[in-house]
Amino acid sequence: MGLMDILQQYSTQAGARDQNVASQHFDEVARSAPPDALRGGVAEAFRSNQTPPFGQMVAQLFGQSNPQQRAGVLNQLLGSVGPGMLTGLGGGMLGKLLGQGNTGNVQVTPDQAAQVTPEQVEQVATHVEKHDPTVVDKIGGFYSEHPGLVKTLGSAALSIALASIAGRMRS
């Protein structure tokens, strides 16, 4: 089945809801779709009222990520707001990292990211989204580069992402 055949199934919002089918379709689309369409589709899944809240989804993905991916997403979140805005959040390693008088561009390392919990990330992502709604697009772009992780969000999120990609490719 070709890219456009797959996307046609999702363009009517009646796309596959079966996890295995949606996962296979997402694999195919992630390999073939333009990067902008893929980024937008993942971001749309984060925004949808048919999926869990943004912070919860980011925390879920963070929990499935390797240390480099964890550092990458934390750096995306920190890049959306100044460290001063987050010093009261996150506790643990993230709180220490941000509380060390860092006022510039903080870069979280994989070792530091390994010490941050998904619960802390959920709190931070929720807070950042309230202050910078464009963070959803940034995190969507980050995770669109890791489609294997996106597939862990489940069939509803994948179907929403695929429907959005279908719409973007028709435009």
Image: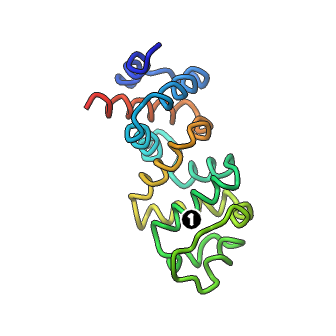
Could you say which is closer to the camera, residue 151 or residue 4?
Answer: 4
Q: Residue at x 59, y 25 (%)?
A: 19
Q: Residue at x 53, y 60 (%)?
A: 125
On the image, the x and y values in percent for residue 135 come to: 44, 58
On the image, the x and y values in percent for residue 35 come to: 42, 39
Q: Residue at x 54, y 25 (%)?
A: 22
Q: Total marks drawn? A: 1
Could you say which is closer to the camera, residue 26 or residue 46?
Answer: 26
As drawn, 147 above or below 58: above
Is 143 on the left or on the right of 94, as rendered? Answer: left
Q: Residue at x 51, y 50 (%)?
A: 142
Residue receiving disc 1: 124
Amino acid at pointer 1: Val
As drawn, 24 above or below 110: above
On the image, the x and y values in percent for residue 109 come to: 66, 65
Asked which quadrant contains residue 92, the reply is bottom right
